[in-house]
């Protein structure tokens, strides 16, 4: 069965610093991967997605992610973090066998220090 | 704003009661998904409907049921509620031919 691991539960960065959030997946075929962000009291907003093709994908809010098949990773990056980026970030993989459910990682809580 | 709406935003009820959560998908989306988010279980897939038919089932309890109506809105019914059912319940929708899902703001259920 497919699974997603986010090894970092909490990350703190200074405003203006670069950010990398890690995500590792376990999936037999080519995965369809996503990053979502959840601000306090809010729903999940789709940041970016990877289906195939170019392994570096761009998303909203200045985020990007790189798919590395050899490392089974799909890490999220941002060159310069803003205080408003403080939120919880979820990596997810879609299962295409019998429906398209999302399997989520446990999330990484990002704190931004001013 | 994702275009997915959920009502109510908050719900407080007692153990043993039954509640109904409602979701309206984005215009044109045929698939509706329900997810539960709790501190101990994280985000868990419950059930998917596509154009009125059940498409996939996850870790959904027998006390829970869902349906999708001809106008494509969906309802999640939770009965014989227990304290452990307290959670945030999300609805998401997608176009039938695409994989990305768009989430509503959620319904926070508190069982006392």
Image: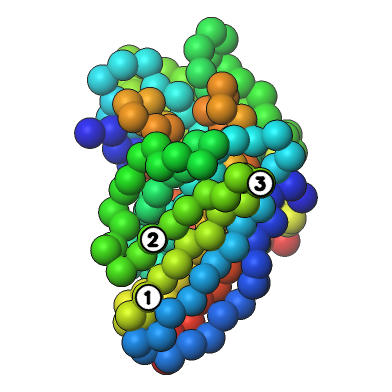
Note whether residue A1 is visible: yes
**Mark-to-mark CA distance, 3 and 1:** 24 Å
Image coords of residue B15 (percent x, y): 36, 89
Which residue is tagged 1?
B79
Which of disc 1 and disc 2 is earlier in sequence? 2
Quadrant that contains the C terminus of chain B: bottom left
Note whether residue B43 is visible: no
**Mark-to-mark CA distance, 3 and 2:** 18 Å
Which residue is depicted at the point 49% across and 46% down?
B33
Left or right of A78? Residue A75 is left
Which residue is depicted at the point 74% across and 47% down?
B3
Against A6, is B34 above or below?
below
Tag 2–tag 1 contact (CB < 8 Å): yes
Left or right of B3? Residue A4 is left
Image coords of residue A75 (percent x, y): 48, 32
Could you tell me how many numbered marks the image carries? 3
Image coords of residue A60 (percent x, y): 72, 35
Answer with the quarter of the image where residue A92 lies.
top left
> Where residue B65 is drawn, which disc sits there?
2
Disc 1 sits on a residue from what chain? B
Which residue is tagged 3?
B71
Which of disc 2 and disc 3 is earlier in sequence? 2
Task: Give SS at disc 2.
Answer: strand
Which residue is depicted at the point 39% across and 22% down?
A31
């Amino acid at each position: 069965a497919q699974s997603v691991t986010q090894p970092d539960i909490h990350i703190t960065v200074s405003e203006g610093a670069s950010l990398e959030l890690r995500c590792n997946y376990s999936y037999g075929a080519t995965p369809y991967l996503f990053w979502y962000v959840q601000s306090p009291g809010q729903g999940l907003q789709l940041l970016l997605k990877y289906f195939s093709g170019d392994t570096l994908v761009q998303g909203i809010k200045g985020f990007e992610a790189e798919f590395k098949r050899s490392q089974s990773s799909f890490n999220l990056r941002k060159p310069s973090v803003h205080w408003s980026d403080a939120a919880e970030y979820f990596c997810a993989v879609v299962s295409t066998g019998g429906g398209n459910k999302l399997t989520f990682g446990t999330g990484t809580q990002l704190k931004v220090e001013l | 704003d994702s275009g997915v709406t959920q009502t109510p935003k908050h719900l407080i009820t007692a153990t043993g009661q039954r509640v109904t959560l409602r979701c309206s998908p984005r215009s044109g989306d045929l698939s509706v998904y329900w997810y539960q988010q709790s501190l101990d279980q994280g985000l868990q897939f419950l059930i998917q409907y596509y154009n009125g038919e059940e498409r996939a089932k996850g870790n959904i309890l027998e006390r829970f049921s869902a349906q999708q109506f001809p106008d494509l809105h969906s309802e999640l019914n939770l009965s014989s509620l227990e304290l452990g059912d307290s959670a945030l319940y999300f609805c998401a929708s997608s176009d039938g031919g695409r994989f990305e899902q768009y989430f509503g703001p959620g319904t926070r259920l508190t069982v006392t």
